[in-house]
Image (cartoon, rainbow, N blue to C red):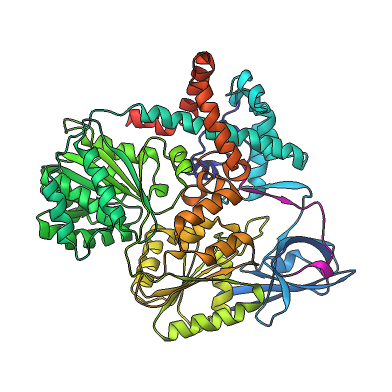
Amino acid sequence: MLALRDLKGLGKARLDTLEKAGVHTLADLLLTLPARYQDTSVSLPIKDIAPGMEVCVSGWPKAEPRLSRFRGLSAVTLRLLDETGGLSVVWYNQPWLQTQIHKEDPLTLYGRIDRDKQGRVRMASPVIVKERGILPVYRTLAGLPPKTMRDLIRQALTQLEDCCPETLPESLRMKYGLCERNFALRQAHFPDTKESLAIALRRVSFEGMLLYQAAAAALRGERTKGAVIGVNEDDVKRYWASLPFPPTNAQARVLGEIAADLSAPHAMGRMVQGDVGCGKTALAFGAMYLAARAGWQSALMAPTEILARQHLESARRILEPLGVSCGLLVGGMKAKERREALEMISSGRWQCVIGTHALISESVEYSRLGLVVTDEQHRFGVRQRRLLSKKAEKAEAAPNELVLSATPIPRTLALVLYGDLDLSVVDELPPGRTPVKTRIVPEDRRDGLYDFIRKQAAAGRQAYIVCPLVEESELIDARSAQDAYAELSLGPLADLRLGLTYGDQDPVEKEETIRKFSAGEIDVLVSTTVIEVGVNVPSATVMVIENADRFGLSQLHQLRGRVGRGAEESWCFLMASPNERLKTLCETNDGFRIAQKDLELRGPGDFLGTRQHGDTLIPGMALGADVQMLEETSQCLKWLRAPGQEAEWAAVRESARAAFARITDEIAMN
């Protein structure tokens, strides 16, 4: 059987790229399903197109393409004609296209229709269509063009029977109407019809959700003897009394639940879920204070260095007056500073340690680690949390785990997604918060939006412009961050200070860009969803979300939470045509209500389908899952664990162990 390295067109650089994305075997590659599909089988007449549409058009250039340059950026423009009319087309930062497109040669393009700054209908940075049909679109990986990815998948499919055996018992497949796995994977990558694609996605989504629940159930059953942190009720009262604000009823209830867990003989595994601004950080510090009072050390792991430093400032302000020593450990430290930090941690002189992934690096030794807190659950997997817990080997028992999540999730779904954790919900906001005003902005109002941003900048305020993609892919249907940055720098916001940041950006460059924005040295930050967490800029009052219809409501709500953090009135503008989903966001700031609506309209794929940088948590989930499937898989798990299904349950449990080896085997190995 072929190995991944044997595929044609896969040199060392591309192999490294795949491995960094978690693709180590042919099976991993085949389970890397498309992010979406594009139907390029039909071209629409130019006279029938309108702003906001994502379409195929066919015609011929009226003249040779024109190349213009400004401040190191470039634009290639042409006029595309068909029998029904003409369409302006522009590509940013792709100057080579000038020599690849010729007057009156047939040309088929796929892209999104919008308007230019003069209000004329146009197609911005489309792709040149060379294949017709239902085409898979894989998430962008550096150095792996979409065509190369499709070629690799086609080669891997020749080994499908050997590397991707069936995972579900036949009786289960018959009971729930699921096709065979091999058929599903072939059709999920290269569907023959829309009907066969739907059948395939149902199978892979059902399998993924079922196996994830089975793996989570197994982890939940592994609860071990925990560090018993005796809690004195007077300490709880002393903590709340030390804060400048009284706790909400929800905060008081949840800290009580945490205190009960800390005192129990088994290790706590609890997620605290609540909306932006509900006071989760105060709860985490409360738990860390209770641990310190009982003689235990705590570690808080944040997803970014900037957020870790913000937490340290807050911890020193809140905990140090109560006698709790706090310190920082992040990856960017100088050697001497890091040595000193490691000594403070291992000696126990820092009772509260705050940091990033550096907290789980091999050289870190803790003194008496009794509590592990991870901030922003969707940025860390179970594996990272368990690795941090395993750093407590010098302690006599496993540390307690507390997970904070600012992504409101309906309770039924949270119990599936975080099945290894107990759940606390902070369903109350402190009084006095000013809600962010949210508006849907159609394409023909874009100029007015830019005028508003310029006025805000003149008043010393800042804005985010968030795009769903970093750069244009082969089959693009959304405005990319790099395109938006180039266009705005050349045009409507040329007089402002602009910055660009995205997930795969050089870490030093990314940190510096976000630092400048936080310091007020950048007026407008053009970004992908990398700013979804870890950026707290009180002077940012405007959030613009391009192609808002491409995001789930819960993610839009999370992005909206980046503004409205100061005293100024704040706004969130959704660039899209009005629809029922987006109107919900304009009507409420209640994250749980929004999440429930998202679950009803889009299904659980928005929550279960993607992780940081777009990594797939459950293959096919974002494309094939719905609420009914969530219920079906939960019922299926109950059926499997009932008497008489021992053989089927054993088979599914083994498939779950294999499917989620990275959160089971790797934990054991580390």
The residue lying at 50 percent from left, 25 percent from top is 638
Observer-nearest residue: 159 or 310? 310
Q: State left or right for residue 263 relative to residue 216.
A: left
Total marks shown come to 0
Q: In x, y percent, where is residue 5?
A: 56, 34
The residue lying at 21 percent from left, 34 percent from top is 264
Query: Which quadrant is home to the N terminus?
Result: top right
Q: Is residue 541 visible?
A: yes
Quadrant of the rendered image containing residue 539: bottom left
Most extreme residue toward the front is 249
Seen in the picture, residue 143 relative to 387 is either above or below; the reply is below
Query: Which quadrant is home to the C terminus?
Result: top left
Q: In x, y percent, where is residue 179?
A: 68, 28
Q: In x, y percent, where is residue 54?
A: 71, 61
Q: State left or right for residue 180 relative to residue 412.
A: right
Q: State left or right for residue 345 relative to residue 469.
A: left
Majority secondary structure of magenta residues:
loop
Observer-nearest residue: 320 or 437? 437
Q: Is residue 153 magenta?
A: no
Q: Is residue 620 visible?
A: no
Q: State left or right for residue 575 relative to residue 363.
A: right
Residue stretch rendered in magenta on the structure: 33-50
Q: In x, y percent, where is residue 615?
A: 50, 45
Seen in the picture, residue 425 relative to 195 is either above or below; the reply is below
Observer-nearest residue: 223 or 55? 223
Seen in the picture, residue 52 relative to 156 is either above or below; the reply is below
The residue lying at 23 percent from left, 37 percent from top is 399
Seen in the picture, residue 440 relative to 185 is either above or below; the reply is below
Quadrant of the rendered image containing residue 564: bottom left
Q: Is residue 38 magenta?
A: yes
